[in-house]
Image (cartoon, rainbow, N blue to C red):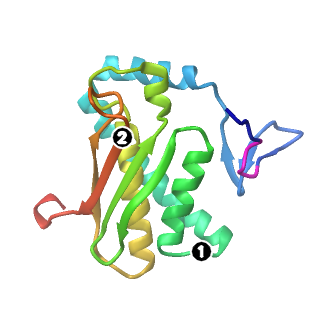
Amino acid sequence: MTKLAPALPIEVDSETGVWTSDALPMLYVPRHFFINNHVAVEEALGAEKYAEILYHAGYKSAWHWCEKEAECHGIEGVAVFEHYMNRLSQRGWGLFLTEQIDLESGTAQVRLEHSAFVYQLGKTGKKEEYMFTGWFAGAMDQILAVRGSSLRTVAEQTQSAAEPGCDVGVFAVQPLTDAAR
């Protein structure tokens, strides 16, 4: 294994200790700390309710992040989505690879390798990375809105490396149906 220094810019305010990357405040916590907290909340609320809460929070956060990063780097369209996948990968959540994206149709497919959840929890037999799902729809919808499109999307995890017979996670983004709006 080759080890690298972080590829994303990190600045730490000497007076406050606040970490920033690309002018956005960040937290740096051990993986086990985050995932243990995640599991505790899931156990308290139930996976379905917790997934719903995380979907909406993640959607909102991804929209905000993509908006700020597009402005900071002067990028748009697919470049924003790819930048988001790159930054997620650089922050240790796993390796996010865009297998397909089409802004005209509002579709995308993302493959997740080396999931932090699977590394921490192992083969649990269930989809463990549902926390990420709202991120993909939020990113896609922010990009579509900037393009002037009224199309909105929904994302779902279709497989997880924590499930038997699966080595990677897969997420699909597709247009919201009128009935679901």
| Magenta segment | 5-9
Which class describes the residues within 10 Å of circle 2: few (<14), some (14-19), or many (20+)? many
Q: Secondary structure at mark 2?
A: strand
**Magenta region, mostly helix, strand or loop?**
loop
Task: State which tag comes first along the sequence, 2 or 1.
Answer: 1
Residue 20 drawn in magenta: no
- Residue position for label 1: 75
Q: Residue at x 41, y 43 (%)?
A: 132
- Residue position for label 2: 169
* 175 left or right, relative to 64: left
CA–CA distance in space, label 2 to label 1: 27 Å
Mark linked to residue 177: none
Q: Position of residue 179 (x, y in %)?
A: 10, 62
Cβ atoms under marks 2 and 1 closer than 8 Å: no
Question: Label 1 sits on what residue type?
Answer: Ile
Q: Secondary structure at mark 1?
A: loop
